[in-house]
Amino acid sequence: MYNHYGNLATTVYEITKPVGTSLNGDIDYYSERLEGITGKILEAGVGSGRMLIPLLEEGFQVEGVDQSTDMLAVCRDNLDKHHLQTSLHQDNLTHFSLGNSTFEAIILPTSTFCLIENEQLAYQTLTNFYQHLKVGGKLILDLDLPFYPEVEESTTTSFTLSETEVITFEKKIISIDFLEQHIVYHLTYSLWRHGELVKTELQQFLLRWYGLNEFKLMLEKVGFKNINVSSDYEFDVMPTDSNQTITFEAWK
């Protein structure tokens, strides 16, 4: 029933977040925090290459892994357009295995980690990251803090593809569970051609949140050390507001 970033969702993502689009300065921040790394880097949840391609153009050796085949197909097209090459892997972040490949850094921007459905899978993902890092390698990832939206919140947006085609995007909150620390959205992507509905994609979109101390303890339990917390892409600046983007950096 549900898609995970299918064709229509990927099209909307490309419209709203094309290659090189910096979200509140995240590309510059990640570039600065990766400075000095000359070995391989893995971008988990690479998507269509929004951050991957600028990092490659700066000279970093970045590979990508993502669950969505549609996203990876667009990423390959974007690599071709920019005359770049790298390895892309289609797999789930929880259990991907790249053989004997290890990395000097693994990055997971745009709070993608919050899409992992429960605590058990979150631990499995962090453990998988740890196992794919070289000794002395580091993990950098973003999180969103808890927020309290209105239960009635529902939005509809349209994206014009051509004179005859439009994609509408509807986002509804289905549930908020404060004990399980997550919010669930129902997303509907609809393609209209000459005013007629020709395709629909449904996506269940779960966002899980973590407290700062909670996530630090999770990283430590997996084996990470020298854990740093930053906010709004200002390194080593502790958050003061729950609406800020939180970035964790931890070392193996």
Image (tube, rainbow, N blue to C red):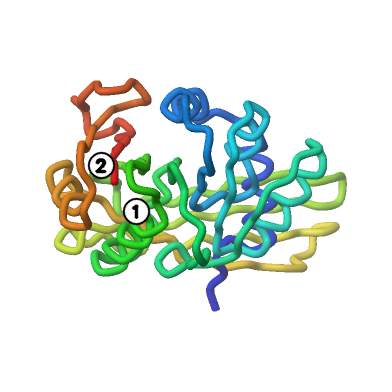
Picture residue at 56% right of the left edge, 49% below the top: 46
Residue 126 horizontal/vertical position (percent): 31, 57
Q: In this view, does 74 lie above or below 228?
A: below
Q: Nearer the viewer, residue 239 or 93?
A: 93
Q: Earlier in the sequence, mark 1 or mark 2?
A: 2
For the question of whether residue 53 can be seen, the reply is: yes
Residue drawn at point x = 67 percent, y = 44 percent: 14
Residue 179 shows which numbered tag?
A: none
Of the 4 image quadrants, the one containing the N terminus is: bottom right
The amino acid marked with disc number 2 is Leu
Residue shown at the point (72%, 68%) measured from the top left: 199
Decide which of 155, 177 is in the foreground and name it: 177
Instruction: Check residue 145 in the rendering and tell me which mark sits there, or answer none.
Output: 2
| Mark 1 residue type | Glu
Which of 91 and 71 lies nearest the eye of the viewer?
Answer: 91
Answer few, some or many: residues within 10 Å of disc 1's Cα (few below 14, many 20 plus, some between 14 and 19): few
Residue 35, placed above or below residue 112: above
| Image side of residue 143 versus residue 219, left or right | right
**Which image quadrant is residue 80 in?**
top right
Image location (x, y in percent) of residue 13: 62, 47
Q: In which quarter of the image is residue 201?
A: bottom right
Classify residue 125 by image quadrant.
Answer: bottom left
Identify the disc placed on residue 152.
1
